[in-house]
């Protein structure tokens, strides 16, 4: 059993004041703790581990993933000749660009500690992600290219994590 616990890596004897403990505690309150921990640990520019800084890290990860997903949608739309798929990808591209803008707004609002408007921006971004997915359904039933779908799922998961962390500030 001890070997299994060591291999899992998330159950470790760590001191009460350890940053990893705080990050683990905060991330465990989300539905996507692994996504949360991975994102926060990837942010080496963070000065502190307070909730606003951790939330900023998560929103920045979501924004970065939105950029990648939007660029993927744009590239796919440019290289697709099938009309219905091209139309869906172009609409998805525009919506993911809106997600980027919403998350960019959320980053600026976080820096200004304008938490109510951060929640509005996160909500707008989440709606746009779902609208992006919906471009491939409702009567046309086009499969979403796997890489694009993975990107949209990552944005949605990070956005959900950010909303949970933000609720700790409200």
Image (tube, rainbow, N blue to C red):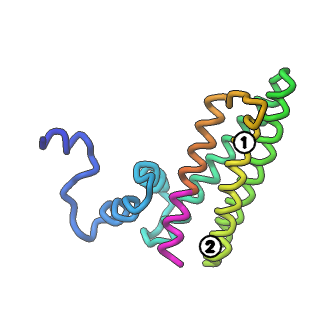
Q: Is residue 16 above or below residue 67?
A: below
> x%, y% of residue 54?
48, 65
Residue at 61% x, 71% y is: 110
Query: With 5 as the anchor, is 165 left or right in this view?
Result: right
Distance (Cα) linking label 1 and label 2: 32 Å
Q: Residues within 10 Å of mark 1 (few under 14, many from 20)?
A: some
Q: Is residue 11 above or below residue 113?
A: above
Say whether marks 1 and 2 touch (CB < 8 Å).
Answer: no
Q: Which residue is mark 1?
A: 134
**Which numbered disc, 1 or 2, marks the residue closer to the eye?**
1
> x%, y% of residue 158?
54, 53
Farthest residue, direction top: 81
Query: With 32 as the anchor, is 85 left or right in this view?
Result: right
Query: With 97 as the anchor, is 10 left or right in this view?
Result: left
Q: Residues within 10 Å of mark 2 (few under 14, many from 20)?
A: some
User: Could you say which disc has been placed on residue 111 in the image?
Assistant: 2
Magenta residues, as a range?
Answer: 160-170
């Amino acid at each position: 059993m001890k070997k299994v616990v060591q291999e899992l890596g998330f159950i470790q004897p760590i001191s009460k004041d350890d940053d990893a403990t705080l990050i683990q505690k905060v991330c465990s309150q989300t539905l996507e703790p692994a996504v949360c921990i991975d994102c926060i640990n990837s942010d080496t520019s963070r000065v502190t581990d307070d909730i606003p800084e951790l939330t900023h890290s998560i929103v920045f990860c979501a924004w970065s993933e939105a950029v990648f997903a939007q660029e993927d949608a744009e590239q796919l739309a440019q290289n697709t000749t099938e009309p219905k798929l091209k139309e869906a990808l172009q609409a998805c591209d525009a919506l993911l660009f809106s997600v980027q803008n919403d998350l960019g707004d959320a980053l600026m609002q976080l820096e200004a500690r304008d938490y109510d408007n951060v929640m509005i921006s996160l909500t707008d971004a989440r709606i746009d992600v779902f609208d992006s997915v919906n471009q491939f359904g409702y009567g046309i039933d086009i499969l979403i290219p796997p890489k694009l779908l993975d990107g949209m799922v990552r944005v949605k998961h990070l956005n959900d994590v950010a909303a949970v962390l933000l609720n700790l500030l409200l």
